[in-house]
């Protein structure tokens, strides 16, 4: 299949192995409950519908998310050693710079950080689990 793709042959791949589709596909179609609900360029789809997760490895563990950080809807993970923040990387204001400033202001230090972009599988699961409005139903 890879060789055919490299030669420019159009391939229609149907699979439940989303990692396979993410690796090989240029465009992705999603079928849910027998309905084609989306066809999109893979990279555009990930950019448009994907989210990013920022994980901050804390210098000292926390027992709870400080009240001063409530605006960011953070999750405490890793036995209190990590703060996790999910955000829309395409938004005009991600909230990341203000979060880091506020953490510094209140004395919550971190020793490392990393981000993770949503995978095609994350997006697929979100799409097929969204409730669908029946055709003709009032919105």
Image (cartoon, rainbow, N blue to C red):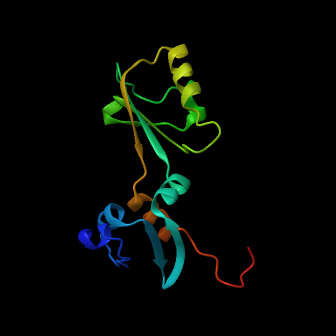
Q: Is residue 67 visible?
A: no
Please tell me whether residue 25 is drawn above or below residue 109 in the rendered image: below
Please tell me whether residue 22 is drawn above or below residue 12 in the rendered image: above
Q: Give the quadrant of residue 59.
A: top left
State how many labels appear.
0
Give the farthest residue toward the right. Answer: 138
Give the farthest residue toward the front. Answer: 7
Q: Specify the quadrant that holds the C terminus.
A: bottom right
Q: Position of residue 69 (x, y in %)?
A: 55, 28
Instruction: Residue at 48% x, 85% y: name it.
Output: 34
Between residues 84 and 39, which one lies in front from this camera angle? Answer: 39
Instruction: Residue at 39% x, 27% y: name it.
Output: 63
Between residues 135 and 67, which one lies in front from this camera angle? Answer: 135
Between residues 103 and 10, which one lies in front from this camera angle? Answer: 10
Q: Specify the quadrant that holds the N terminus.
A: bottom left
Instruction: Residue at 44% x, 30% y: name it.
Output: 64
Q: Is residue 6 visible?
A: yes
**Would you say 74 lies left or right of 7 here?**
right
Q: Position of residue 107 (x, y in %)?
A: 48, 14
Q: Position of residue 120 (x, y in %)?
A: 41, 60
**Would you say 18 lies left or right of 87 here?**
left
Between residues 72 and 124, which one lies in front from this camera angle? Answer: 124
């Amino acid at each position: 299949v890879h060789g055919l793709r490299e030669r420019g042959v159009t391939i229609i791949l149907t699979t439940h192995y989303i990692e396979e589709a993410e690796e090989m596909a240029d465009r992705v179609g999603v079928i849910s409950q027998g309905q084609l609900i989306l066809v999109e360029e893979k990279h555009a789809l990930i950019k448009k519908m994907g989210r990013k997760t920022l994980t901050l490895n804390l210098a000292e563990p926390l027992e709870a998310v400080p009240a001063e950080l409530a605006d960011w809807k953070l999750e405490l993970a890793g036995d209190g050693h990590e703060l996790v923040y999910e955000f829309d990387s395409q938004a005009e204001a991600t909230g990341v710079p203000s979060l880091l400033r506020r953490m510094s202001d209140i004395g919550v230090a971190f020793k490392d950080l990393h981000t993770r972009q949503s995978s095609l599988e994350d997006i697929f699961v979100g799409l097929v689990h969204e409730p669908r409005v029946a055709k003709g139903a009032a919105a």
